[in-house]
């Protein structure tokens, strides 16, 4: 009986048990933060590509009769060239939508979240930019 009471009061090894219980939770949380950082990187890449595409869409190539605007395919190719971000997802540069004296540029990014011990939901980020073309000026 005395050995049992002495064993109950003995705290040797308690720290290692607590450590073993908390490490998986801590590592999963740190990995989850890393996964969310990947979304922020993708967002920055989309914003950069949209900015470059918008700048390219507003360029006016001078001609004798006025100016020639860039084609929608050239604008889309420029956005694809300037796009950066994490490899673990998929980017989709959508076709340029013509409006009245404007163009709408849109990029989407889809990624299935992975939290090391379980798979999370698929997250889709969509960013758009409305660009007024040279004919609107």
Image (spheres, rainbow, N blue to C red):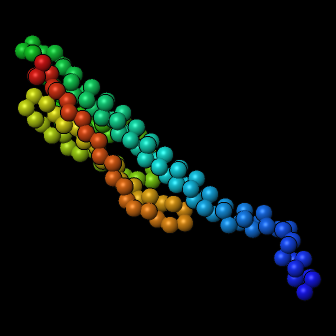
Q: What residue sits 30% from the left and 34% below the top? A: 50
Q: Quadrant of residue 82?
A: top left
Residue furthest out toward the top: 64
Q: Quadrant of the C terminus?
A: top left
Tell me: residue 87, above or below residue 133.
Answer: below
Count the labels in the image. Answer: 0
Of residues 67 and 135, the one drawn nearer to the viewer in this rendering:
135
Viewed as shown, does residue 134 lie left or right of 27?
left
Give the x, y percent position of residue 53. 27, 32
Viewed as shown, does residue 128 lie left or right of 114?
left
Residue furthest out toward the bottom: 1
Tell me: residue 23, above or below residue 108.
Answer: below
Q: Quadrant of the N terminus?
A: bottom right
Q: What residue sits 25% from the left and 39% below the top? A: 128
Tell me: residue 75, above or below residue 117.
Answer: above
Give the x, y percent position of residue 115. 51, 60
Q: Quadrant of residue 20?
A: bottom right
Of residues 78 and 19, the one drawn nearer to the viewer in this rendering:
19
Q: What residue sits 32% from the left and 40% below the top? A: 80
Viewed as shown, does residue 30 lie left or right of 54?
right
Give the x, y percent position of residue 37. 49, 46
Q: What residue sits 60% from the left and 61% below the top? A: 25
Evaluate whether residue 74 shows in this view: no
Evaluate whether residue 101 shows in this view: yes
Q: Quadrant of residue 99?
A: top left
Viewed as shown, does residue 5 lie left or right of 61?
right
Tell me: residue 122, above or below residue 92.
Answer: below
Of residues 113 and 30, the one drawn nearer to the viewer in this rendering:
30
């Amino acid at each position: 009986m005395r050995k049992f009471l002495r064993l109950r009061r003995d705290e040797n090894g308690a720290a290692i048990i607590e450590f073993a219980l908390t490490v998986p939770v801590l590592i999963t949380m740190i990995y989850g933060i890393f996964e969310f950082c990947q979304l922020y990187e993708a967002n920055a890449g989309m914003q950069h590509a949209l900015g470059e595409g918008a700048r390219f869409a507003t360029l006016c190539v001078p001609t004798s009769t006025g100016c020639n605007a860039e084609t929608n395919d050239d604008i889309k190719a420029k956005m694809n060239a300037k796009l950066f971000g994490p490899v673990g997802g998929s980017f989709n540069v959508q076709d340029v939508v013509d409006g009245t004296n404007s163009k709408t540029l849109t990029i989407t990014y889809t990624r299935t979240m992975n939290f090391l011990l379980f798979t999370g939901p698929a997250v889709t980020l969509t960013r758009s930019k409305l660009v007024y073309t040279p004919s609107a000026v």
